[in-house]
Amino acid sequence: MFMDNYRPLNPQEKGASETNFKINFIGLILGIFFLLYLKDTDISIFWKFTGLAILISISVSVMEFLCYEKNSALGLLRLHRKLSLKRCLYKILGLSFVFACIAVIYWLFPIFQDATFKQWITYLKTMLPYLVCLSVVYIILMDRVGRQEKDEYWHIGYYLIHRKNGLNQEQLANLVRSWLVKVFYLGLMVPWSFGHISNIQKADFFHFSFDNPIALFFTLETICYGIDVVYGAIGYISGLKLTNTHIRTAEPTLMGWMVAIMCYWPFWGNVFYPHFFDYHHANRWQEVFDAGSVIWYIWGGVIIFCEFIYAMSTVAAGTRFSNLTYRGLWNTGPYRWTKHPAYVFKNISWWFVAMPFMLHSTELAVKSSLLLFGVNIIYYLRAKTEERHLSHYPEYREYALLMNDKSIFRFMTRICPFLKYRVPTDK
């Protein structure tokens, strides 16, 4: 079941990446100029984000088509069968049932009544008429060009009418997990994107000044995190079979879900960080070095470099970005250097930002360092659970084994052998 969905971008090239960093980066540049163009307009943030998502998704897909022709995502657009109105109605019913279940989840659980998720729900309500119309058009189109004549939604719709289930439990469980990923992460990423878009539009790209080094640092940091969050949100929205960016499988283990979900609000901000991993004790790097000094610029430069690599890791994933899922192999951009560049450089940046080892109290320094190391372990577990999931796919196993010899951190495997990738025996 895991391997049936594999289709490399270029079937003639073994282990080919299904995303292209150069194309994704061009999409990013187009998006930045789009936001700058709308900088002084009265268009609401909802529509700015929507326009940005459409621009990047379409431009990336079109560029892939132009570069890879019929091997690309849009190359899937070929007629496979005649349109069946009855079949489409089953699919529409199945998808409507899924949307109804999501609405109940958002209504039922108190976590989704918080301000962040409420902003997402408000956005959903605004986009609902367009979402309904586009969903119907999409189902009709996919009924003709999709590879599956009777997909998961057809089986759900058919079951609701006839009480005969043709969807096996593994497929149904994967569909549920896939939608739960979207339910949770879209509710965070999209509202966060609204704030970051506003910050990016306020940033003065063309008048950086070294006279105010603190403002310069925070501008660069805002851009890095803005790129990560906004491009990530677009990745969650862009998961479609039509462009071959859909979720093929979602993380099947409870452990994988736990170590991923706990790193995000509200679990991290309200539970795990303040009660278990608070490694900040009024000591940040700006308070250690004099602003504008040589060491200040060097230290801040390292932080910005790490955050930039972290952002470019999201760009490398492009419209396939998503936590807890497999949506095709990407081994371009920072992923040419190491398997988990986002995790690695994000965690390095936290050591440089918090500097827990520089506290005046030795006891507090040791305590804070151990707590931050605990955070590093969580991300190590995230990496390992991801590897176990992705190891169901031969192309990922090939890539991961190659990184044992090619990664810029391969020397670490000699110091810590457990860091070396090994194909799981129970994959």
Image (tube, rainbow, N blue to C red):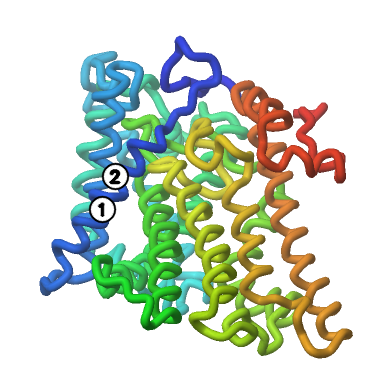
Q: Residue furthest top?
A: 12
Which quadrant of the structure image shows residue 350?
bottom right
In this rendering, position of residue 250 left or right of residue 210: right
Identify residue type, mark 2.
Gly
Which x, y percent locates residue 96? 34, 47
Residue 23 seen by the camera:
yes
Q: Assess disc 2: are there few (<14), some (14-19) or many (≥20) residues with their C-alpha within 10 Å of its C-alpha.
A: many
Residue name at image x 62 percent, y 79 percent:
285
Residue 392 in the image: x percent, y percent?
A: 66, 28
The residue under the point 50% across, 31% down is: 328
Q: Which amino acid type is marked by label 1?
A: Gly
Q: Helix, strand or loop at disc 1?
A: helix
Q: Quadrant of residue 393?
A: top right
Picture layout, residue 402 above or below residue 336: above
Left or right, 344 with respect to 72, comes to: right
Residue identifier under label 1: 31
Q: Nearer the viewer, residue 294 or 18?
A: 294
Q: Which residue is mark 2?
A: 27
* Foreground pick, 23 / 323: 23
